[in-house]
Image (cartoon, grey):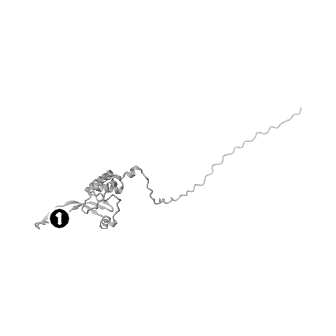
Amino acid sequence: MHNGAPVSKNVVMNKRELAKSVAVQADVELKTVAAVLDGFTDVVTAVVSKGEPVSIPGFAKFVKVDRAARMGRNPATGETIRIKASKKARITPVKAFKDAVLAPATAPKLKKGAYPIDPTAVAAAGKAAAVAPVRATVAKAPAKKAPAAKKVVRRAAPAKKAPAAKKVVRRAAPAKKAVKRAR
């Protein structure tokens, strides 16, 4: 463990230290990071063993390579020997990773305590989000509206006039004439 001491050039970061650093950097609990690293190695190993390449943009490409049989020389005797065909695993760093390694100024900046590893930062990783979930106010780009659908104007067929209802004309009963009889 590095405990804030200057980092020696020949110290190898093991899986546990990697998990601690990632936990601090991503602000996730150490158990979760360890499980993710295990899952990552399992998935990459299984997929590449089947012959499928795995590429992580900005980091590396994992590939299974078939090497053909060839002739070689025994370095001790100089004798020509036949080398059998074989399969190899190849991990190729991509350009962004190589550029960051060669020019450390371009490498991602780590949070304080991620490396060298600070035990208090590791203990605090993932705890802040669990205690009080706070919504991060991220300035979102305005949502793009879908282009307005063209309105299809359909003209209704001219309304057909309903046949006129027959009017029933009732004639009033003839008015009764009041007849006055003289008596």
Horizontal side of residue 111 vs 154, given as left or right? left
Q: In the image, 179: left or right of 125?
A: right
Amino acid type of the residue that numbered disc 1 sits on in the rendered structure: Arg
In the rendering, at what x and y percent does residue 168 appear? 70, 43
Q: Nearer the viewer, residue 78 or 163?
A: 78
Instruction: Place residue 8 in its image quadrant.
Output: bottom left
Q: Position of residue 21 (x, y in %)?
A: 31, 57
- Which residue reaches farthest left? 77
Which quadrant, please, contains the C terminus?
Answer: top right
- Of residues 69 and 13, the one nearer the viewer is 13
User: Residue pushed farthest top?
Assistant: 183
**Is 96 located above or below residue 155 in the figure?**
below
Residue holding disc 1: 70
Residue 36 spot, x, y in % from top left: 31, 53
Which is more toward the observer, 27 or 119?
A: 119
Mark 1 Cα shell of 10 Å, populated few (<14), some (14-19), many (≥20): few
